Image: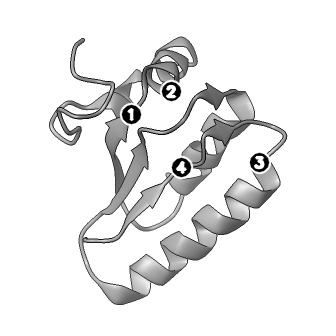
Amino acid sequence: MSDRYELPSELNIYSALESRDALLAWASEQMTKAKGYLEISARDVSEVDGAGLQLLAALSNMEQTWHLVETSEPFADACRTMGFGHWLDPRYLNASGGESKS
């Protein structure tokens, strides 16, 4: 898929409702356009908490597969801390993202 979703810089409880609505609307639109998987970028995320990561966990319950294509260091650290390190699969991450090493 060509349209990549850019997560907001603040992916936390204070922006969770707005972020959820935008992410789900984008995902629904993408699922009607093409086959394949959704590309999500977390390169600009500077603040993230459990509520922010729950948004992506909820996306995992949808029919469409998704992959992170870029991550910031704060986002990658939060994923590892919260047990979502499997989201950081290097096969899908660009070298330009913050997640270029293990």
**Does residue 2 appear left or right of residue 10 in this picture?**
left
N-term-proximal mark, 2 vs 3: 3
Quickly name the residue at label 1. Answer: 71
Q: Quadrant of residue 68?
A: top left
Q: Nearer the viewer, residue 67 or 9?
A: 9
Q: Which amino acid does the dot numbered 2 rest on?
A: Phe
Secondary structure at numbered mark 2: helix
Scheme of colours in the image = one colour
Pointers 4 and 3 in contact (C-beta within 8 Å): no
Quickly name the residue at label 2. Answer: 75
**Does residue 19 appear left or right of residue 26 in this picture?**
right
Secondary structure at numbered mark 3: helix
Q: Residue furthest bottom?
A: 32
Q: Residue at x 64, y 47 (%)?
A: 55
Percent position of residue 59, x then y: 54, 55
Pointers 4 and 1 in contact (C-beta within 8 Å): no
Pointers 2 and 3 in contact (C-beta within 8 Å): no
Q: Quadrant of residue 31?
A: bottom left
Pointers 4 and 2 in contact (C-beta within 8 Å): yes
- The answer for how far apart the CA atoms under marks 1 and 3 are is 18 Å
Quickly name the residue at label 3. Answer: 16
N-term-proximal mark, 4 vs 2: 4
